[in-house]
Amino acid sequence: MQNLTSREKKTQKLKMVSKESINKSLHTIRNKLGDACLIAVTKYSNFEEIKLAYQCGQKDFGENKVQDLISKSEKCNYPDIKWHFIGHLQSNKVKQLLGVPHLVAIHSIDSIKLVKELIKRKKSFKGSSLKLFFQVNTSGEEEKSGFKSREELVEALKLAQQQLLDKTFLFAGLMTIGRIRTEHFEEDAKNCFEKMVDLKNDISTEFGKIKLSMGMSQDYELALKYGSDYIRVGSKIFKG
């Protein structure tokens, strides 16, 4: 009998949703997007569910774990699929990640150390272009990754400009996640998104056009009101 990881067991326990349900959810979200891009998060979704979403016209997908992304990209190797890596990226996984076919963006550049590793491994990327989003810890939570100060972020961006960014590796923008544990969800989400917008405006003169990647299943509508260009939604699509 095949041994399953805890993640695989959890995935198997999730109810398989229908194509109709996925299509309805995608339609509801797309009607609110405006010009923003919807990234369908596949963290707890299997190959068949990803396939159904793709058949419903969804092309952008996001994954949190490098190994899971490698596995899913191999099974869902459609010519026009776009994979976004949206989870915490360990330095020792950078080379593997850059080898994923159809990888178009990394939304979680969260340290100068990671920028240096990308510089070291940039030849491992075989795609045409890769968008990089720098993660900012706008809530100040210790358990959350991301740059915690403007100074640290600017230092990382300058290093990237000098040694990483070119016609292939592109600085796309900033990413943030609303406060994880809170009794005042909407208020705290607003604070996080406001800080992100202020930071974007503050550094845009020096670093050019900046897109925002913020908003998940619980708060994507609020994030859109604050001008988010990319939202990352999973459960609202795949849980019906």
Image: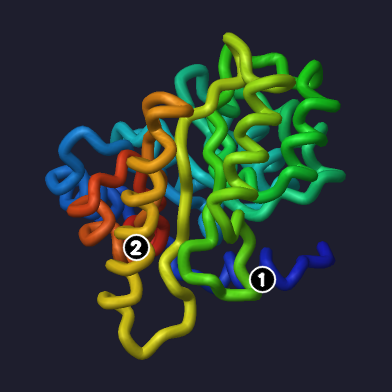
| Label drawn at residue 217 | 2
| Label drawn at residue 179 | none
Position of residue 44 relative to residue 165, above or below, is below
19 displayed left or right of 178: left
Q: How is the image coloured?
A: rainbow
What type is the residue that disc 1 sits on? Lys
**Between disc 1 and disc 2, whose residue precedes?**
1
Position of residue 7 relative to residue 169, above or below, is below
Q: Position of residue 55 (x, y in %)?
A: 35, 34
235 displayed left or right of 140: left
20 displayed left or right of 2: left
Local packing at callout 1 (Cα closer than 10 Å; few below 14, some 14-19, many 20+) is: few
Image marks 1 and 2: residues in contact by CB distance under 8 Å: no
- The residue positioned 63% from the left and 61% from the top of the image is 145
Q: Position of residue 75 (x, y in %)?
A: 63, 35
Residue closer to the observer: 175 or 5:
175
Residue reaching furthest bottom? 183
Q: Position of residue 183 (x, y in %)?
A: 36, 90
Local packing at callout 2 (Cα closer than 10 Å; few below 14, some 14-19, many 20+) is: some
Q: CA distance from mark 1 to mark 2?
A: 23 Å
The image quadrant that residue 129 belongs to is: top right
- The residue positioned 78% from the left and 50% from the top of the image is 90
What type is the residue that disc 2 sits on? Ser
Q: Which residue corresponds to mark 1?
A: 9
Q: Position of residue 203 (x, y in %)?
A: 43, 38
Which quarter shows the C terminus?
Answer: bottom left
